[in-house]
């Protein structure tokens, strides 16, 4: 996931776009290291150090990674799109937003 | 390296085949049909041999291409499905038939006609069987209309309250999966259509393309409510919790986290402890990624 997401974030730099993580790792210090090491520039919510944390529980997440794509109004437009499908989803929403 | 690996893989698979062959002859019953145990054993051995080959290849530093070639040679349930279906047909109404049908769906992961036939035999003869317990929940992520028919039959025909409860919950989850498949097919998501065509068949994908996802979601909601409102269903245990709790979470997801719904706000903090809100990102297209470094 990391290389794809890194290139997506880089490609859309300056566009009305944000990638937000919800991180469910146990060890906060360890994940800070990973973020630094792999050059993950986007922000992540902290899910309380567990896959059973408050955010993933409320969102009924049972598989990782789980992906949601929201439009500029916060409306869910795509779920669980990966790789190229994620790019298409984001690009189509950005095209709509920019043509307004 | 590649040739050597392929040869090793082939010889292992062949030896698995030959060592299993004499056992097969002995295991044939008076009806002339081999036993399910023999097929399962053969499949398990071939899978284990393949796994050993793959592991040692990976350890020896095989290239990505070599490894993906090996993955293609992995013994699949489909190879054994024809024989297992024969066993199933000969034993449709007895315990061996139930076991074979469950194996075909869960372990051999057959698709298309064998999948539909296995479910048909289970709903005709085995709606009270304990062997359905885990099978039903594993079908939650299957979008096929054959799954709807099967789970509905268990819910309506089983004498076992536990089977009814699991069927009802699995039906809700399955319908949610199906609605999401219909959304993706209608949106023309090429990757998803390719996946669904491989696992469900072209015909089923065409049928799903004409369904109304909102109606399917509504049907899913009714089944979740049925689990929540039935005391006997709600208390059935699952994953250190109950079907009632799982149904409440599932219903929340359906009502608030489906495509077309405004996402609920997330108010929390980031990994460094700085406060963070999803709604701060209004005006932007947002990808939310539930992730972990594992």
Image: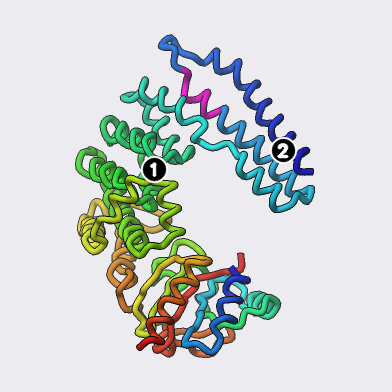
Secondary structure under the numbered disc 2 in the rendered image:
helix
Drawn side of residue B137 relative to residue B162, left or right? right
Q: Is B162 one of the magenta-colored residues?
A: no
Residue B97 sits in which quadrant? top left
**Residue that carries the numbered disc 2 in the rendered image:** B6
Looking at marks 2 and 1 on the same chain, the residue that comes earlier in the sequence is marked by 2
Q: Is residue B77 above or below residue A97?
A: above
Could you say which is closer to the camera, residue B31 or residue B67?
A: B67
Q: Which label sits on residue A7?
A: none
Q: Farthest residue in the top direction?
A: B30
Secondary structure under the numbered disc 1 in the rendered image:
helix
Q: Is residue B46 above or below residue A71?
A: above
Q: Which residues are magenta?
A: B34-41
Q: Residue at x 71, y 39 (%)?
A: B53
Q: Residue at x 78, y 51 (%)?
A: B61
**Residue that carries the numbered disc 1 in the rendered image:** B135
Could you say which is closer to the camera, residue B276 or residue B57?
A: B57
Residue B79 place in picture, x, y as percent? 52, 32
Q: Residues within 10 Å of mark 2 (few under 14, many from 20)?
A: some
Residue B139 place in picture, x, y as percent? 37, 48
Q: Answer yes or no: is residue B228 visible.
A: no
Q: Answer yes or no: is residue B119 visible.
A: yes
How far apart in space, not on screen, are marks 2 and 1 (Cα)?
Answer: 35 Å
Q: What chain does badge 1 belong to? A: B
Residue B136 place in picture, x, y as percent? 35, 45
Could you say which is closer to the camera, residue A5 or residue B94?
A: A5
Q: Residue at x 38, y 26 (%)?
A: B88
Residue B28 place in picture, x, y as percent? 49, 14
Could you say which is closer to the camera, residue B204 or residue B135?
A: B204
Quarter placement of the C terminus of chain B? bottom right
Drawn side of residue A64 relative to residue B113, left or right? right
């Amino acid at each position: 996931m990391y290389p794809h997401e890194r290139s997506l974030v880089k490609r859309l730099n300056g566009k009305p776009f944000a990638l937000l993580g919800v991180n469910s790792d146990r060890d906060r210090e360890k994940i800070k290291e990973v973020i630094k090491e792999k050059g993950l520039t986007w922000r992540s919510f902290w899910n309380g150090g567990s896959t059973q944390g408050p955010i993933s529980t409320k969102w009924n997440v049972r598989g990782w990674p789980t992906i949601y794509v929201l439009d500029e109004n916060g409306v869910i437009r795509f779920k669980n799109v990966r790789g190229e499908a994620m790019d298409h989803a984001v690009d189509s929403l950005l095209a709509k937003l920019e043509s307004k | 390296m590649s040739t050597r690996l392929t040869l090793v893989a082939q010889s292992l698979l062949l030896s698995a085949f030959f060592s299993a062959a004499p056992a097969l002859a002995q295991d044939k019953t008076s009806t002339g049909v081999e036993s399910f145990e023999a097929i399962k054993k053969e499949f398990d051995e071939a899978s284990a041999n393949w796994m050993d080959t793959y592991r040692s290849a990976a350890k020896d530093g095989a290239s990505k291409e070599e490894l993906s070639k090996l993955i293609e040679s992995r013994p699949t349930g489909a190879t054994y499905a024809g024989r297992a279906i024969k066993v199933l047909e000969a034993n449709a109404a007895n315990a061996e038939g139930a076991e074979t049908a469950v194996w075909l769906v869960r372990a051999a992961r057959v698709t298309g006609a064998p999948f539909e036939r296995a479910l048909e035999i289970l709903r005709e003869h085995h709606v009270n069987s304990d062997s359905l317990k885990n099978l039903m929940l594993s079908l939650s992520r299957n979008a096929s209309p054959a799954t709807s028919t099967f789970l509905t039959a268990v819910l309506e025909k089983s004498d076992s309250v536990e089977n009814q409860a699991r069927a009802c919950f699995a039906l809700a989850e399955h319908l949610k999966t199906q609605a999401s498949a219909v959304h993706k097919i209608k949106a023309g998501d090429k990757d998803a259509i390719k996946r669904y065509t491989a696992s469900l068949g072209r015909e089923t994908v065409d049928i799903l393309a004409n369904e109304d996802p909102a109606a399917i979601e509504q049907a899913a909601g009714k089944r979740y409510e049925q689990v929540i409102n039935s005391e006997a269903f709600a208390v059935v245990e699952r994953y250190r919790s109950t079907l009632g709790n799982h149904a409440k979470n599932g219903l929340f997801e359906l009502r608030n986290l489906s495509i077309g719904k405004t996402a609920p706000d997330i108010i929390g903090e980031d990994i460094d402890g700085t406060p963070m809100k999803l709604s701060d990102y209004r005006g932007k297209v947002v990808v939310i990624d539930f992730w972990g470094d594992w």
